[in-house]
């Protein structure tokens, strides 16, 4: 059984693995992908239907990004040491998995929640200052019924990869782009922000300001089955460019103190996993989204 520290360090590594930053912005329709008018101010609201809490678990490695045995790819994105060691090699059945739990598993549970986001994209690339703006509020529960409120009022002008000044509109992310973790498939992010948020847990405001990432993207997860199964995370060639939008809210175990990030500071979720550890991150998915912009 992994210790709590080992678990959240492994999860943090899954968030922070990035390659060389490559700016991949698309402000026009391509290959049937929708875009929102840009640059401008975008308003997003979720209706509260179909909200999912992502649980820790391994992530299968997409051969399109990471290659196959004898023809490996993406070693700068995910070194061999971070790929699963299985009896048949780290690409088990041609689809290897990460050796440790990640925030990008196929495991999820139904919760309740809603969100309102306003984002303004002015600054094009990351740097020491930004004119981008974020005004967002999220309220949701854990699978155990704990209640959370998250308020984001500040866009972060730069992180450890290109972040478009804090707010990006119509940008390719993840996969092999070098923008965000390669454990997510490459996707068109219609609206994304990286911000500083204040978190309340069961009505109590937490001490730390939290690092927050949000995306409104192409559909990257399957539908939920009647028995609660499904909701599997896609590979690159499975991303649904024409399906309903999905919104992602991610809080990794990173606090913001004195203007900078502090690693290995778990999110106080209060949600206890079957191994007795407290889940140290939040990854919330909203499947019913309205956009004005």
Image (cartoon, rainbow, N blue to C red):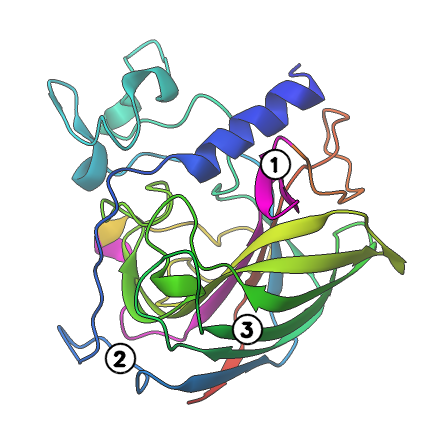
User: Mark 1 = which residue?
Assistant: 262
Tell me the element at label 2.
Answer: loop
Choose top left, top right, bottom left or bottom right for residue 68: top left
Count the numbered circles shown.
Answer: 3
| Crowd tier of the residue under label 1, counting other residues whose Cα lies within 10 Å: few below 14, some 14–19, many 20 or above | some
Mark nearest the camera among 2 and 3 is: 3
- The Cα atoms of the two marked residues, 3 and 1, are separated by 22 Å
How far apart marks 2 and 3 lie (CA) works out to 22 Å
Mark 3 lies on a secondary structure that is strand
- Residue 234, percent across and down? 34, 51
Mark 2 crowdedness (10 Å alpha carbons): few <14, some 14-19, many ≥20: some
**Residue that badge 3 annotates:** 134
What kind of element bears circle 1? strand
243 inside magenta stretch: yes
Nearest to viewer (mark 2 / mark 1): 1
Is 163 placed left or right of 8 in the picture? left
Looking at the image, residue 220 sits to the left or right of residue 65; the answer is: right
Q: Report the magenta residues as a range.
A: 237-264
Please check the rendered image and state whether residue 197 is part of the magenta-colored stretch, yes or no.
no
Residue sitting at the far left? 71
Residue visible at 34% across and 67% down in the picture: 218
Could you tell me if the residues under marks 3 and 1 are in contact, i.e. CB atoms within 8 Å? no
- Say whether disc 2 or disc 1 marks the residue closer to the N-terminus: 2
Residue designated by label 2: 34
In percent of the image, x 47 and y 64: which residue is there? 193
Relative vertical location of residue 142 with respect to residue 117 in this rendering, above or below: above
Residue 175: % across, % down = 27, 47
């Amino acid at each position: 059984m992994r210790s709590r520290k080992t678990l959240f360090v492994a999860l943090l590594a899954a968030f922070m693995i990035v390659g060389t930053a490559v700016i991949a912005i698309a402000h026009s329709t391509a290959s049937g992908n929708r875009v929102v008018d840009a640059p401008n101010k975008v308003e997003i609201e979720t209706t509260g239907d179909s909200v999912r809490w992502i649980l820790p678990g391994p992530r299968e490695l997409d051969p399109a990004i990471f290659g196959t045995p004898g023809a490996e790819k993406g070693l700068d994105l995910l070194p061999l040491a971070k790929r699963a060691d299985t009896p048949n090699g780290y690409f088990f059945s041609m689809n290897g998995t990460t050796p440790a739990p990640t925030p990008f598993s196929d495991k999820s549970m139904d919760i309740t929640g809603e969100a309102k986001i306003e984002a303004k994209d002015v600054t094009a690339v990351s740097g020491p200052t930004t004119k981008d703006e974020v005004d967002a509020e999220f309220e949701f529960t854990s699978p155990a019924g704990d209640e959370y409120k998250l308020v984001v009022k500040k866009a972060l002008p730069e992180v450890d990869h290109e972040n478009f000044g804090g707010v990006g509109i119509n940008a390719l992310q993840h996969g092999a782009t070098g923008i965000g973790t390669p454990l997510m498939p490459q996707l068109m992010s219609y609206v994304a922000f990286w911000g500083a948020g204040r978190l309340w847990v069961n009505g109590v405001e937490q001490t730390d300001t939290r690092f927050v990432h949000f995306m409104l993207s192409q559909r990257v997860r399957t539908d939920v089955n009647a028995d609660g199964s499904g909701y599997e995370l896609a590979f690159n060639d499975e991303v649904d460019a024409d399906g309903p939008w999905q919104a992602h809210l991610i809080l990794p175990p990173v606090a913001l103190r004195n203007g900078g990030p502090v690693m290995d500071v778990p999110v106080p979720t209060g949600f206890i996993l079957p191994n007795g550890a407290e889940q140290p991150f939040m990854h919330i998915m909203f499947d019913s989204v309205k956009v004005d912009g």
